[in-house]
Amino acid sequence: MGDPSSSSSNPEGTPTRPQTPGPTEHPTPTQPPTPSAIATPQRVVLGKRKRGGDEHLAQEERHHVRNLAQVDRHWQLTMEATARAREEEMALRREENAQTQAFNLAFLHTLGQVVDSRRGPSLHEDEPPL
């Protein structure tokens, strides 16, 4: 086998672990990345992407804050419009109630006159008919 100090039965000298197959080979703890893999131009591009990602996250945060402000403003305007609509509805109901009350009073007055005219002069002998 390979190393005499290793008591393991596998050829690499490390305990065996079940490995899940992946779409690409990733370095495992038993296979450290090579120095050339660390210093590849791809790593530099990834670093730039990270900085761009930070800028992107900051831009998303600004967009999120603006969106929240717009939503808050929308709700404020909606609540104000609802309050105005309620006030207008209440004013309309007050006007309708006043008109109904005036009609009812006029109707009762007229009905009273009709009832008085039907009673005849026998009940009201000293009052002249209308």
Image (spheres, grey):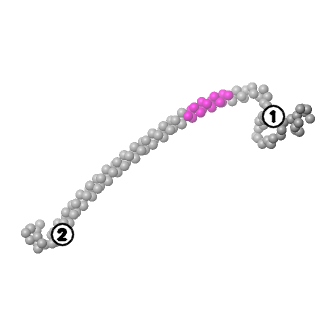
- Main SS type for the magenta part? helix
Badge 1 crowding class, 10 Å Cα cut-off, few under 14, some 14 to 19, many 20 or more, is: few
Residue occupying the point 34% across, 48% down: 87
Res. 15 visible in picture: yes
Q: For the magenta stretch, what is the residue range?
A: 47-61
Asked if disc 1 and disc 2 are in contact, CB closer than 8 Å, the reply is no
**In the rendered image, the vertical position of residue 112 relative to residue 61, given as above or below:** below
Q: Position of residue 47 (x, y in %)?
A: 67, 28
* 95 on left or right of 120: right
- Compared with 86, 64 (above or below) is above
Q: Which amino acid, by three-letter code, is at mark 1? A: Thr
Task: Give me the residue at 9% from left, 67% from top.
Answer: 127
**Is residue 110 found inside the magenta-colored segment of the image?**
no
The answer to which quarter of the image holds residue 117 is: bottom left
Front-most of 32 and 50? 32
Q: Secondary structure at mark 2?
A: helix
Query: Mark 2: which amino acid?
Result: Val
The answer to whether residue 12 of the structure is visible from this angle is no
Q: Is residue 57 magenta?
A: yes
Which dot, 1 or 2, sits closer to the camera?
A: 1
Which residue is tagged 1? 30
- Quick check: 121 left or right of 48? left
Quadrant for the C terminus in the image: bottom left
Who's the residue at 57% across and 31% down the image?
58
Q: Which residue is mark 2?
A: 115
Q: Quadrant of the N terminus?
A: top right
Where disc 1 sits, the SS reads loop
**Where's residue 5, x and y in %?**
89, 32
